[in-house]
Image (tube, coloured by chain):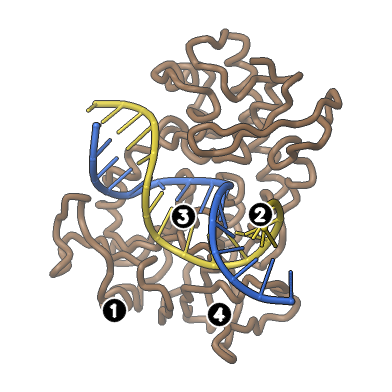
Chain colours: A brown, B yellow, C blue
Amino acid sequence: MPELPEVETTVRDLNKKVLSRTFIDVWTDFEKMLRLRLSFAKGYGRTQQGFGGQAKNFKKFKKELRGKKIQKIWRRGKNIIFELSQSYSLLIHQKLTGHLLYGTWKKEDGIWKSKTSGLLEEKVNTYIHLLFTLDNGQMLALSDLRKFAKAELWKTEELKNSEEIKNLGPEPLSKDFTFEKFKEVLKKKKGKIKQILMYQTVIAGIGNIYSDEILFEAQIHPFRKIPKLSETELKKIYQAMRKILKKAIELKGSSITDFRDIKGKRGSFDKIIKVYRKEGKKCSRCGTIIKRAKIGGRSAHFCPKCQIL
DNA sequence: ACTAGCCCCTGGGAGC
DNA sequence: TGCTCCCAGGGGCTAG
């Protein structure tokens, strides 16, 4: 699933490929993943959830997006933000199984077939639910097996001031995010360390894979409660977080589930994954069998010997 | 203001 | 072989 390193990989690739391109057309077979969140648009006024509502009218979404030029592409947490001309922004969250792909496709027998050579083996094309045509004749596709991903059109200022962006915690790799800051944000919470690391309002961008890997690296049990962690242990977690995330970006993310870069290529961090989905396998450090346990409806993977409760 | 738990989805694996 | 059941998993939302 795309977490910070995967999203960062995607954003870097997008900057090389689609910066300065203009959206010409949009296609979807799943309108639910699109939302118009323009406060001024008729029929999309403020609701109890904030601005907007589901883009029941796909035509409207298409009309607003057409002709907008991509001026900047950046990441905040696991969100991809395309800043467009006329102060519009397109927000894409890939959620569990979404990934953006760049190339050309043609629909044959109801299935999108890739026309880009050497690209996209496998089934990713079957799961294309959103397709943007660009002014250079190329396309940007959102492939998403589980259809949880979303694409939202905003006015840039409103997006930047939105609850969902403003409430995100600090970027774990930013220069300002020192150990002192890390302690400060964690100390506000009392829960189990793994859950808190994945809490987007505490720190933005870490999900199940990297929280498991960070805690293995730091030799901290995922169920440890924040207030019980010593200064030394917190430092270990902080250092492991920076190390693991940087390494994962360097390796262009993990493809343990189905992440691909925008050319459909796998990342290679999964080759060095130590615990995530390694239940029943031997710990690379001590040989003990890796365990899996439920935490807040999610599974945590850890070495019961190296990571003492 | 908090948080636990449901819900959105679909492929894959288990059980029969 | 083929059916049914169950599960993963980020985050929005709701009920408590």
The residue indicated by pointer 2 is A257
Q: On the same chain: label 3 and label 4?
A: yes
| Label 3 – label 4 distance at C-alpha | 19 Å
Q: Earlier in the sequence, mark 1 or mark 4?
A: 1
Instruction: Determine which residue is flagged by label 1.
Output: A63
In this picture, residue A242 sits left or right of residue A72:
right
Q: Residue at x 18, y 59 (%)?
A: A39
Could you confirm whether marks 2 and 4 are on the same chain? Answer: yes
Element at label 1? helix
Q: Residues within 10 Å of mark 3 (few under 14, many from 20)?
A: many
How far separated are the C-alphas under marks 1 and 3? 21 Å
Specify the subunit that label 3 lies on.
Answer: A
Q: Considering only order in the chain, which callout, 4 or 3, is on the residue closer to the N terminus? A: 3
Q: Amino acid at mark 3?
A: Ile
The x and y percentages for residue A170 are 44, 33
Q: Compared to A33, does A259 lie above or below?
A: above
Three-letter amino acid code of the residue under disc 1: Lys
Q: Nearer the viewer, mark 2 or mark 1?
A: 2
First-in-chain label (1 vs 3): 1
Residue drawn at 62 percent across, 9 percent down: A232
Residue position for label 4: A138
SS label for mark 3: strand
Q: Are marks 3 and 2 on the same chain?
A: yes
Check disc 2 and report its element: helix, strand or loop. Answer: loop
Position of residue A239 in the picture relative to residue A94 (left or right): right
Precedes in sequence: disc 3 or disc 2: 3
